[in-house]
Image (cartoon, coloured by chain):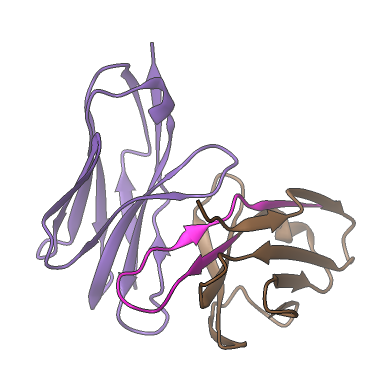
Chain colours: A brown, B purple
């Protein structure tokens, strides 16, 4: 069964360092998303991406964050200068198309710990 | 403000028992409602998706109901198993920009033997 894969599963970094989280969406999917979940809190939307550009982003997704699809298979989330409050589980998700409601598939997540 | 509220926050039941989880939302205009199961430290896995025209949908031992008039949904789990222990998250989507998948905080279900 096709799945969304994410790497690394866990990353520990020092405050102020740059972090790149990688995702390989399901191969024929067209819409890609990043969500985050701070420990004990609800899942929060960060950004959606379609046709090589951001289609929607939340207030959380400030200038410290960026996304790109560098090679047609990977979908990356970059945090330029990490802060303690960036510590969270980051989930990548993808869907085939925008047809409502459309199944959204999540990866297993990347746990980011900022020290 | 678009919100999704779930109750109870946590629930403990004995294996084999049934339970019902509640979800109330204020997202408008409403597009669809999803229930996800999230095991600890794992990604959410979809259980059901319902549009406004659907009142009930089943997936094995999971049955979701939707009342779009009162903006309420429930997830009923029948004959619970130990593997049902997880967080169950209600997610609502609206038609307008900025309402892409609004997550509830989830109900943590613990099934004990």
Q: Between residue A105 and residue A34, name the one nearer to us.
A: A105
Q: Is residue B27 left or right of residue A108?
A: left
Q: Which residue is drawn at 58% across and 55% down?
A: A107
Q: Which residue is drawn at 68% across and 56% down?
A: A6
Q: What stretch is highlighted in magenta?
A: A92-115
Residue A105 location (% of width, % of height)? 48, 59
Q: How many marks?
A: 0
Q: Between residue B103 and residue A50, name the one nearer to us.
A: A50
Q: Residue at x 24, y 23 (%)?
A: B79
Residue B53: which quarter of the image? bottom left
Answer whether residue A93 is magenta in the image. yes
Q: Is residue A52 left or right of residue A113?
A: left
Q: Residue at x 35, y 69 (%)?
A: A102
Relative height, residue B100 to residue A40 (above, below): below
Answer whether residue B16 is magenta in the image. no
Residue B15 location (% of width, % of height)? 32, 16
Q: Is residue A76 left or right of residue A33?
A: right
Q: In this view, does B40 lie to the left or right of B7?
A: right
Residue B58 location (% of width, % of height)? 20, 45
Residue at the limit of the structure toward the top, as seen here: B113
Residue B6 location (% of width, % of height)? 32, 48
């Amino acid at each position: 069964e096709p799945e969304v894969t994410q790497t690394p599963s866990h990353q520990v970094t020092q405050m102020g360092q740059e972090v790149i989280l990688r995702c390989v969406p399901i191969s024929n999917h067209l819409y890609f998303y990043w969500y985050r979940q701070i420990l004990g809190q609800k899942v929060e939307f960060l950004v959606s991406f379609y046709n090589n550009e951001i289609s929607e982003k939340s207030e959380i997704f400030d200038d410290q964050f960026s996304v790109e699809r560098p090679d047609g298979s990977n979908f990356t989330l970059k945090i330029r200068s990490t802060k303690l409050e960036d510590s969270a589980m980051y989930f990548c998700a993808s869907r085939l198309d925008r047809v409502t409601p459309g199944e959204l598939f999540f990866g297993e997540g990347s746990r980011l710990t900022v020290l | 403000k678009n919100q999704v509220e779930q109750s109870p926050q946590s629930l403990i039941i004995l294996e084999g028992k049934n339970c019902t989880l509640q979800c109330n939302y204020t997202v408008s205009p409403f597009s669809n409602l999803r229930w996800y199961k999230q095991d600890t430290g794992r990604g959410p896995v979809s259980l059901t998706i319902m549009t406004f025209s659907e009142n009930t949908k089943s997936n094995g031992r999971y049955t979701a109901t939707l009342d779009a008039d009162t903006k309420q949904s429930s997830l009923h789990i029948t004959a619970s198993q130990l593997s049902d222990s997880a967080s169950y998250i209600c997610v609502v989507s609206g038609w307008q920009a900025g309402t892409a998948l609004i997550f509830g905080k989830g109900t943590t279900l613990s099934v004990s033997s």
